[in-house]
Image: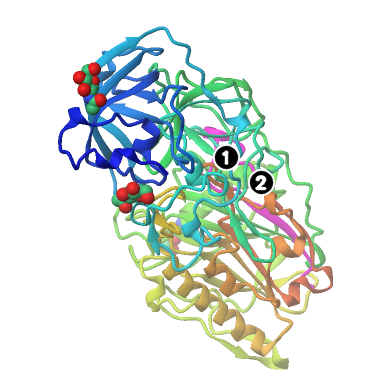
Amino acid sequence: MKFTTSILFCFGSLSSTLALSIAEINGPAFISPYKDQTVANVTGLVTAVGSSGFYLRDLPSVKKPKKLDGSSAIYVYGSSSAKQVAVGDVITLSGKVEEYRSNDLYIPLTEITGARDILKVSSGNTVEPIDLSKLKIPTEQYSKLDDGNIFGVPNNQALISVVNATLEPKKYGLDFWESLVGELVYVKDPAALGKTSNYGDVWVRSKSWKATGLNKRGGLTISASGNDKKTDANPEAIVIGSPALDNTRNPSNIKLGDTLGPLTGVVTYAFGFYRIIPTTALTVTNSATSDYPATSLKSSGSCSGLSVGQYNVENLTPKSAHIPGIASHIVNKLNSPDLLFLQEVQDNDGTTNSGTVSANETLSTLISAIAEAGGVTYNFVDISPSNNQDGGAPGGNIRVSYLYNPSILSLRNPNPGDATTAITVSKGLKGVPELSLNPGRIAPAEAAWTASRKPLVAAFNVKGSSSPLFTINVHFGSKGGSSSTQGDARPPINGGVEDRLAQATLLKNFVNDITAIDANAKIIAAGDFNEFPFVAPMLVIEDNKFRNIDEVAGIKEEERYSYGYDGNCQQLDNMFVSKGVWKGRGVRAYEHVHVNTWAGNEQVSDHDPAVGILDVC
Ligand SMILES: *[C@@H]1O[C@H](CO)[C@@H](O)[C@H](O)[C@H]1NC(C)=O
Ligand SMILES: *[C@@H]1O[C@H](CO)[C@@H](O)[C@H](O)[C@H]1NC(C)=O
Ligand SMILES: *[C@@H]1O[C@H](CO)[C@@H](O)[C@H](O)[C@H]1NC(C)=O
């Protein structure tokens, strides 16, 4: 490598040095070798101009030194500089190289600030974007520092900005996008990977790029596959920022699966992600339907074909505007499951911080709405938490609850527990496991549940069956405090994972308490685990006796999703079934019902529900 430029500062005089190419300024790694240094007479072609800066690319005549895989373009920050140039100008300038980030969790962006001595060499030159479909975009791994698993625990073991590894753009997604930072690029055939965000951002892939994890809807699902369980978190997805360089804004109603018009834009990094700022806002060329078809799964009306659903109903209160929408989903899309595991039911006065903890009006209001929509008249089961002890929005006292069809299920020997009493299991008559409380909560005093929902255990008698059905409804601690998939920390910070690990252990211990008494006990644990099925906490729960129903039902990996986030379809909502349920084809069918991930900004809840048909006789 010929880095003649290293003499630049030994002489301490700018006028006696050779000018650097932009590729040399960017260098071979994430952090510029000229960080915080002044560079003079940098020559380049202006490829795009925004209101607070412009984008400069090495001239075609500049030969990129071998093994220099960084970008040949750079952002020149400053609104007054931007006013002095136009697209197609070839200019020279001097300025300071900076590594900018607005938050320590982000990867720094190399840019030139304080540009001066801007000289126009020529104007009206042709500007061609780089066609990304001509490049090989990594589709699975983000960074070498993730060691094959972006969801690895422990996480935050290394920082991109500190390790400053040499870029390997053919292998790793972050390296790929870093190698294009500042470039003007062209995206052929873009398709939306989620809904327009509150900021107007839209995640896309291109139908002309290779993709892994592609689901039927056209989204990208994260997964772990292969013998080595390497995770695939879809670095081929890229966010398209808003406003565009011309200040137009992306449509606010884009949704997963929409086909978009081709776009040209500049690659940059902001708010935790590499992104393309388009020259002009996105257009929708084909709008996908937001209407997910009703499930074909139906209850048989007895234990041989019990329908069991789950739904995170997103901060439901008696006054929620989305109650009719939730009720309609339960009736018209889920066929009124016999048993429903709900999460995020708030107390009767919602987030009013009044000391009210009961949710009987919230649940009664939902039950009435379901009946009005032509569904089953359900009964409910819940236990109110101690005021403000279970996390969620302050004053809301969210909890998990069951709805059940009283013509098919009944609570077995009801003996309701309270917020603070731990449920236990003992051997009853004929060796049947019996609960000390019904319903009851698992180990509520354990530190693992601080500011989090405690699992709600119940035992039901099911029509046609002589043995109890045990259920555990969960809503594990949130992922708050996580860093982005494209952040500085590797693997990214998975907020709350230690709590979820401890919660998973308590849950599994309880399951084991039941199966120790009856290895064939019928147990279903379901809800919002706030974790993907292949990440550490879930692996504590899953074993060959207590299995994830997606595995048992053979749902294709790409179709396992219940949530859309940062360009990825992902599964936070899971259901586990004991051997007593899954053996002998006890799991007849299972379906993630994508009523919300498909609905764009018209979604009723942020999570999709799911429903299964189980033989629990
Ligand atoms: C930069 O350009 C100016 C004007 O052409 C010249 O006088 C100066 O020597 C150049 N400096 C370097 C470092 O090339
Ligand atoms: C980053 O790596 C480049 C290339 O190896 C090196 O020149 C530069 O000094 C490094 N910067 C930091 C902050 O480590
Ligand atoms: C809720 O519970 C309170 C206290 O037990 C009772 O007075 C009220 O009628 C209940 N409301 C509904 C809608 O069931």
Horizontal relation, residue 244 to residue 104: left or right:
right
Residue 499, position in %: x, y? 42, 69
On-image quarter of the C terminus: bottom right
- In this picture, which residue range is highlighted in magenta? 592-617
Which secondary structure dominates the residues rendered in magenta?
loop
Residue 428 at x, y percent in the picture: 65, 91
Left or right: residue 212 compared with residue 82: right
The label on residue 325 is 1
**Quarter of the figure with the N terminus:** top left
> Of helix, strand and loop, which one carries label 2?
loop
Q: Determine whether 118 is above or below 253 in the image.
A: above
**Is residue 564 on the magenta stretch?**
no
What's the residue type where badge 2 is placed? Thr
Query: Which mark is first along the chain, 1 or 2?
Result: 2
* Residue 202 vs residue 480, the one in the foreground: 202
In the rendered structure, which amino acid carries the disc numbered 1?
Gly
Which of 311/249 is in front?
249
Mark 2 closeness class: few <14, some 14–19, many ≥20 residues within 10 Å: some
Q: Marks 2/1: CA distance?
A: 33 Å
**Which residue is labeled 2 in the image?**
212
